[in-house]
């Protein structure tokens, strides 16, 4: 049941983030072509791309956290884990959950501040509170996927993907 | 200084324990800053830094160049690149190994990833080297070392990260990486030449490529060459920024993949996009952690204390750079490129700036040093990647095989140290 929920979350994150990154690529390309070929760049493209970058990062963190695809110094970890594997996993993943929760909290403070001040992006005048809140939502979702991942113990989430890049 | 050293010690202990590097760096930076200034300030600093850098337009080159690399891997151009390289180098002794170096250099020029280059080359280059009875150590060592070229030849993610930490122009750094990258390709080829001269049995002769396949391979390689020229030529000529180049590169790579019969289904697109997104997220968590950690280090005053030590010890600028490179070599035994950059550069940056050291040159040096770390024990990431693909090759054989290339990298490092213009010549032409 929990594994299914986790799979569903990751699936949704994968779909949304794929669309955002594909649009980001197209937008950058079309903006350059528009500027140099038609002398008509896309208005506010830079801000749109910046916003999409934040979304890609925090949507991607949900996927990376669920699959625990983070960078590790692999020197002694196997030896230490051998003593008490489950406890080790709880400590390591518990630390990651704590760090991610910290990120969610500080971003929530930023979103609250943005809502209070009413700040917007410079060109498109998009409300920063909305952008930051979206980021907070996806960061929080990544904490949920971390916790579920810890409970089900890294399920078969890894798709048949390409080599690590 | 003591607080910062304690912070470093705790961070190393947490990393060695096996905690995720990005999260460990972030938490130690947060706690360290909190001890210095109070946790209210630490919450505010962390939130501002994370939000600011997650929305930094210049950093959008990271997902887009990673996507370009994933799409190029998916386009399966590596076999054509390898055969095209062999078509021109096959007549020399050790031709298959020479072709591996050249193809790895070419592949990394559009892929940008050392690990993907090593993994892909292991699949493409090992079967022919096996077929013609090359020694396991020469074959696998060449593949592992060839993969390291990806970190220097642009586009390179470590160079992007350095550019953010040291506040240097990404485009200039990319251009600065070209000549050192070519130098390393040349040195690697010389290493192959010397190895097969010393041990001729390591590389028995292989027949030339048949003319039909030769034409096919060259035709298959052309679009990739054009993409590389457009991306880097655009940056070099000032026609577009690195970010714009990354969008064009990713789009061009998608077109190449589609022309080669890939990316025809939504599921294929999803696999590629998700791969790029996951890699982006893992890189950004390290980057964000490092930015928070460097705020703590700056606040602790350590970089300025080091500046005082440099004055006190009367280190010349060159000695200072040598000193930092030596530390980076030691760090490279444990950390990969991004880890070295984020931990080392902020600490020494004020001293480097005060000594008028060219930061473009220094960036190339640090990246070159981290390249060495990719194939040296105990953690030579590329060696392990090659081992995971070629499971029947002994780890010892691969480590033995990379020795000539470690020497070549050290010679490359000495050359770039002695002749900074290898790194600065092209960027100076651009300014």
Image: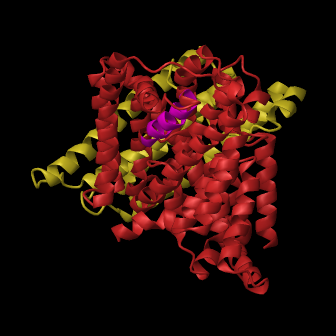
State the residue at coordinates (57%, 37%).
Answer: B147
Left or right? Give the position of B318 relative to A141. Answer: right
The extreme left residue here reads A38
Q: Quadrant of residue B39?
A: bottom right
Examine the structure image and report whether residue B133 is included in the region drawn in magenta. no
Left or right? Give the position of B219 relative to A131. Answer: left
Chain in yellow on the image: A
Image coords of residue B163 (percent x, y): 49, 61
Left or right? Give the position of B191 relative to B233. Answer: right
State the residue at coordinates (33%, 39%).
Answer: B225
Examine the structure image and report whether residue B99 is included in the region drawn in magenta. yes
Q: Which residues are magenta?
A: B96-109
State the residue at coordinates (80%, 25%).
Answer: A86
Residue B424 can be seen, yes or no = yes
Image coords of residue B131 (percent x, y): 59, 14
Main SS, magenta residues = helix
Depth check: give the residue in front, A13 or A160.
A160
Compared with B9, B134 (above or below) is above
Compared with A49, A140 (above or below) is above
Q: Which quadrant is the N terminus of chain B positioned in? A: bottom right
Q: Quadrant of residue B228?
A: top left
User: What colour scheme has been applied to the protein in the rendered image?
Assistant: by chain
Number of labels in the image equals 0
Depth check: give the residue in front, B221 or B301.
B221
Q: Quadrant of residue B226?
A: top left
Image coords of residue B229 (percent x, y): 31, 46
Chain in red on the image: B
Depth check: give the residue in front, B185 or B315.
B185
Q: Which quadrant is the C terminus of chain B positioned in? A: bottom left
State the residue at coordinates (47%, 67%).
Answer: B424
Image coords of residue B138 (percent x, y): 67, 30
């Amino acid at each position: 049941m929990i594994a299914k929920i986790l799979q569903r979350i990751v699936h949704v994150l994968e779909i949304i983030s794929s669309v955002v990154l594909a649009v980001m690529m197209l937008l950058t390309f079309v903006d350059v072509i528009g500027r140099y070929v038609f002398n008509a760049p896309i208005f506010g493209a830079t801000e749109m791309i910046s916003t999409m970058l934040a979304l890609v990062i925090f949507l991607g963190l949900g996927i990376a956290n669920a699959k625990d695809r983070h960078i590790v110094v692999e020197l002694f970890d196997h030896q230490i884990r051998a003593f008490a594997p489950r406890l080790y996993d709880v400590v390591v993943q518990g630390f990651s959950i704590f760090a991610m929760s910290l990120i969610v909290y500080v971003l929530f403070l930023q979103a609250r501040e943005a809502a209070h001040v009413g700040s917007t992006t410079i060109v498109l005048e998009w409300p920063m509170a909305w952008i930051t809140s979206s980021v907070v939502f996806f960061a929080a979702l990544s904490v949920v996927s971390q916790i579920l991942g810890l409970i089900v113990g890294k399920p078969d989430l890894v798709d048949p993907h390409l080599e690590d890049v | 200084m003591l607080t910062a050293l304690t912070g470093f010690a705790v961070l190393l202990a947490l990393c060695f324990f096996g905690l995720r590097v990005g999260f460990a760096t972030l938490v130690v930076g947060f706690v360290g800053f909190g001890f210095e200034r109070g946790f209210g300030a630490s919450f505010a600093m962390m939130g501002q830094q994370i939000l600011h850098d997650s929305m930094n337009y210049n950093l959008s080159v990271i997902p887009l160049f990673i996507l370009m690399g994933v799409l190029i891997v998916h386009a399966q151009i590596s076999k054509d690149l390898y055969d095209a390289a062999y078509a021109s180098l096959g007549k020399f002794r050790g031709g298959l190994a020479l072709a591996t170096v050249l193809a790895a250099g070419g592949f990394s020029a559009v892929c940008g990833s050392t690990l993907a280059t090593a993994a892909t080359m292991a699949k493409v280059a090992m079967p022919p080297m096996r077929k013609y009875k090359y020694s396991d150590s020469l074959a696998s060592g060449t593949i592992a070392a060839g993969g390291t070229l990806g970190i220097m030849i642009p586009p390179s993610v470590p160079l992007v990260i350095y550019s953010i930490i040291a506040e240097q122009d990404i485009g200039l750094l990319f251009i600065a990486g070209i000549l050192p990258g070519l130098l390393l390709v040349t040195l690697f080829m010389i290493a192959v030449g010397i190895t097969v001269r010393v041990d001729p049995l390591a590389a028995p002769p292989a027949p030339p490529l048949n003319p039909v396949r030769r034409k096919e391979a060259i035709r298959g390689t052309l679009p990739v060459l054009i993409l590389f020229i457009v991306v880097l030529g655009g940056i070099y000529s000032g026609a577009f920024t690195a970010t714009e180049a990354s969008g064009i590169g990713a789009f061009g790579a998608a077109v190449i993949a589609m022309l080669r019969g890939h990316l025809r289904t939504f599921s294929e697109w999803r696999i590629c996009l998700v791969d790029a997104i996951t890699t982006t997220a893992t890189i950004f968590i390290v980057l964000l952690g490092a930015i928070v950690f460097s705020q703590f280090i700056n606040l602790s005053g350590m970089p300025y204390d080091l500046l005082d030590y440099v004055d006190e010890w009367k280190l010349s600028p060159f000695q200072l750079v040598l000193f930092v490179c030596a530390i980076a070599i030691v760090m490279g035994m444990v950390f990969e490129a991004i880890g070295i950059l984020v931990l080392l550069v902020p600490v020494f940056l004020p001293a480097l700036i005060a000594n008028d050291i060219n930061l473009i040159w220094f960036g190339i040096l640090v990246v070159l040093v981290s390249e060495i770390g990719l194939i040296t024990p105990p953690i030579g990431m590329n060696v392990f990647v090659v081992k995971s693909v070629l499971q029947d090759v002994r780890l010892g054989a691969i480590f033995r095989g990379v020795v000539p290339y470690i020497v070549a990298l050290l010679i490359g490092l000495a050359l770039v140290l002695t002749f900074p213009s290898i790194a600065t010549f092209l960027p100076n032409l651009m300014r």
